[in-house]
């Protein structure tokens, strides 16, 4: 069986790594860009290692990455974020984020009565009896819950932070999705961990697993421009060649798949997914030649929906000796709210200015100590927001002979976990299909 995998992000690399173990399956992994990893791409400069987005794994002891570790023999280390150093800023006051009992007692983001209510809600979610799962969206639950305003804002902020979406979208996340996500997170013994060395540690091993068989071609800087069916096989056209395959896996944003297949017989089945909206954020990375301040490891501005992570406080492998790596993230609203390009640019400039002011407030001296700075406006960290109105693409679609995986597809968890889990499922489907074919 010859298989084409289109897209070299975490999902595509995972599929290729699994199929690389199977005798009788060969293939090509196509990636249009000049590097592997997709949105998990790692960038190195002047001794600093930076990611386009966080390399954090939530609930690592319950995460799909555990299956990949066992089944693909992955080897990496991780370190847990210190929950006592995670802070929220509200109305100009910094206080501990209510992530455990001690921080909940200390936090200033909830009054005493609402702290008790929050504890009861956490207990109900852990027991899988919370009413939120019965509501279409978080907003509908909050509107009917009778919660105090501070607790409503906390829920919106938690969802905003964990799902990487702007505040206006937090209320649109399905209640059942939130219940499932936080049940898993609240019972985890290791809720937030960083992969030491960044995503590159994972992507390098996935590439090695695929290449080890000698049956896989890794086609970097080669995008697929067209797909057609011919004599029972699928012909993929790139800039320089045409190749025929028995099976095709699309491991790329669903909007791009819909555009690629728009003029094919399968286009109508993909059309409903073309309007899915992605998650976009402003990412502001700064590498410093010294530690200018370390008052906390994470600080989130609840009023303006910004946060800064002292990445090097948890992962000290990413900086030169004595250096510090900070990553700021600002959630961005959809472009549809802007009347013209000038208004949109003014909005992005305002978000960057607020981020720099937050750096000034908590990390004085960062400007003078900066060695590396990178500002990525409108960086996509998730190809499909998990909100009402967006549809996750199934791994198989009626009337379409292809497989689909990635963070915009159906799978377990959010963000990177959905990419891993959907890819693993697609790989297993292909392996089962191969096993059913008589030799």
Image (tube, grey):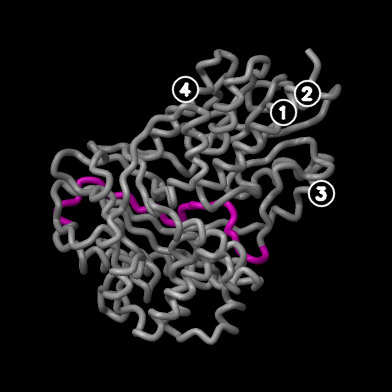
User: Is disc 1 placed on a helix, strand or loop?
Assistant: helix
The disc label shown at residue 208, or none: 4
Whether residue 92 is in magenta: the answer is no
Report the residue marked by disc 1.
432
Q: CA distance from mark 3 to mark 4?
A: 37 Å
Residue 435 in percent (x, y) is at 73, 22
Q: Quadrant of residue 177?
A: bottom right
Q: Which residues are magenta?
A: 367-389
User: Is disc 2 placed on a helix, strand or loop?
Assistant: helix
**Residue 193 seen anywhere in this rendered image of the structure:** yes
Does 58 sit left or right of 133 as displayed? left
User: Is disc 3 placed on a helix, strand or loop?
Assistant: helix
Report the residue marked by disc 3.
268
- Classed neighbour count for the residue bearing mark 1: other residues with Cα under 10 Å, few (<14), some (14–19), many (≥20): few
Q: CA distance from mark 2 to mark 3?
A: 30 Å
Q: Which of the two discs, 1 and 3, labels the residue nearer the N terminus?
A: 3
């Amino acid at each position: 069986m010859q298989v084409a995998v289109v897209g070299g992000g975490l999902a595509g690399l995972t599929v290729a790594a699994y199929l690389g173990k199977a005798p009788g399956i060969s293939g090509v992994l196509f990636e249009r860009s000049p590097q592997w990893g997709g949105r998990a791409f790692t960038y190195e400069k002047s001794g600093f290692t930076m990611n386009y987005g966080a390399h954090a794994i939530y609930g690592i002891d319950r995460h799909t990455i555990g299956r990949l570790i066992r089944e693909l023999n992955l080897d990496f280390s991780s370190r847990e974020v210190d929950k006592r150093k995670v802070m929220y800023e509200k109305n100009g006051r910094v206080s501990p984020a209510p992530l455990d009992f001690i921080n909940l007692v200390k936090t200033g983001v909830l009054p005493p009565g609402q702290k008790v209510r929050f504890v009861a809600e956490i207990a109900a979610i852990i027991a899988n009896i919370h009413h939120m799962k019965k509501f279409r969206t978080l907003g509908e639950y909050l509107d009917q819950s009778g919660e105090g305003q501070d607790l409503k804002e906390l829920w919106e902020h938690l969802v905003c932070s964990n799902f990487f979406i702007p505040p206006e979208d937090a209320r649109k996340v399905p209640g059942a999705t939130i219940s499932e996500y936080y049940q898993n997170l609240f019972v985890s013994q290791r809720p937030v961990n960083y992969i030491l060395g960044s995503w590159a540690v994972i992507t390098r091993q996935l590439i090695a697993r695929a290449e080890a068989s000698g049956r896989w071609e890794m086609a970097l800087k080669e995008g697929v421009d067209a797909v057609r069916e011919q004599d029972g096989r699928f012909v993929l056209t790139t800039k320089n060649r045409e190749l025929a395959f028995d099976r095709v896996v699309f491991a790329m944003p669903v909007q791009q798949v819909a555009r690629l297949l728009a003029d094919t017989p399968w286009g109508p089945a993909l059309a409903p997914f073309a309007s899915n909206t992605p998650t976009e954020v402003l990412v502001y990375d700064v590498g410093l030649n010294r530690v200018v301040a370390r008052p906390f490891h994470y600080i989130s501005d609840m009023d303006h929906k910004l946060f800064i992570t002292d990445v090097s406080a948890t992962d000290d492998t990413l900086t030169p000796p004595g250096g510090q790596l900070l990553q700021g993230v600002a959630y961005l609203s959809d472009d549809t709210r802007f009347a013209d390009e000038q208004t949109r640019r003014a909005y992005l400039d305002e978000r960057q200015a607020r981020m720099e002011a937050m750096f000034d407030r908590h990390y004085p001296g960062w400007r003078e100590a900066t060695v590396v700075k990178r500002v990525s406006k409108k960086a996509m960290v998730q190809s499909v927001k998990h909100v009402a109105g967006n549809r996750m693409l199934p791994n198989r679609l009626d009337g379409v002979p292809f497989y689909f995986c990635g963070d915009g597809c159906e799978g377990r968890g959010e963000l990177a976990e959905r990419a891993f889990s959907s890819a693993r499922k697609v790989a297993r489907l292909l392996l089962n299909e191969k096993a059913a074919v008589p030799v």
